[in-house]
Amino acid sequence: MKIATWNVNSVNARLETVLRWFEETSPDVACLQEIKCVDEKFPAEAFERLGYNVAVHGQKTYNGVAILSKTPLEDVRKGLPGDDGDEQARYLEAVVSGPNPVRVASIYLPNGNPIDTEKYPYKLAWMARLNAHARDLLAYEEPLVLTGDFNVIPEPRDAANPQNWTKDALFQPQSREAFRALKWLGLTEAFLAIDGAPESYTFWDYQAGAWQRNNGIRIDHALLSPQAADKLLACVIHRDVRGWDKPSDHVPLVTELDL
């Protein structure tokens, strides 16, 4: 089973590029972030024609997440528990049905910038809620994949120029500590378990020739429960997609499980 994550940076604006990748790669499951549309405006029919079942948690103009699966999606949950007043569409969870079901979550973690505004405490509070929910999910002792744009640079090696990120929310000690705390629950970071090669990035800014100079960062991750990690076969960054026409500033990350 191939489970992809991709921050598409507006699914409708980049639909041709996104569909090209789906047609070439044909993931079994795909978690999309930053779809930037309400549920009704999501191009579900385009993905259904490719054989996907669709679940969407959208929002006008900003944020928004989706899960696409070749098998039916069950037990769909919209929104991260812990704050009933949070209206930002950043979390979608579902069980991918079949002989070997797996629970997946599409995550668009808050950016948190600027750090001297309310946006950074919101990021940390959101991460605390994610930690609490992940703890609850791990109690099921089932294959679980938490994947998406975490907006966290875990280590200096995950940035081409880490010194440029010292005042950014993505690289603050508290952000990195909260990400480590997630893994300490018993989650395995798929890419590090399989590859972990240097200069492996998932995001390149549109500005200042970042892509051409490989000035990137690794902020898109897949975290696996022990039951999923035991089945881990591969985790690959589809770097070449950043060089396509009308690209997102992120590229897909594909985790393969023996399920």
Image (cartoon, grey):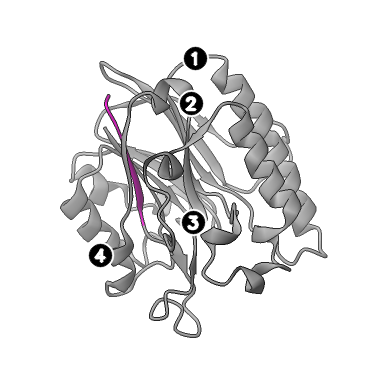
| Image marks 1 and 3: residues in contact by CB distance under 8 Å | no
Give x and y (percent) for residue 37.
47, 56
Residue 108 visible, this orientation: yes
Could you classify mark 4 by the number of other residues whose Cα lies within 10 Å: few (under 14), some (14-19), or many (20 or more)?
A: some
Whether 7 is drawn above or below 95: the answer is below
Q: Earlier in the sequence, mark 1 or mark 2?
A: 1
Tag 3 or tag 4, which sits nearer the N-term? 4
Question: Given the image, on which type of amino acid does mark 1 rest?
Answer: Glu
- From the image, state whether disc 3 or disc 2 is nearer to you: 2
Where residue 39 sits: x, y (%)? 45, 47
Q: Crowding near pointer 3: few (<14 within 10 Å), some, many (20+)?
A: many
Q: Is residue 256 magenta?
A: yes
The span from disc 4 to disc 3 (Cα, nearest Å) is 16 Å
Magenta segment's dominant SS is strand
Q: Which residue is under mark 1?
A: 141
Report which residue position mark 3 lands on: 34
Q: Which residue is mark 2?
A: 225
Query: Between disc 3 and disc 2, whose residue precedes?
Result: 3
Magenta region, residue range: 252-259
Query: Residue at 37% across / 47% down in the picture?
Result: 195
Residue marked by disc 4: 16
Residue plotted at (27% across, 27% down): 258
Q: Was residue 196 drawn as part of the magenta stretch in this picture?
A: no
Q: Amino acid at mark 4?
A: Glu
Q: Which residue is at the front of the view, 24 or 237? A: 237
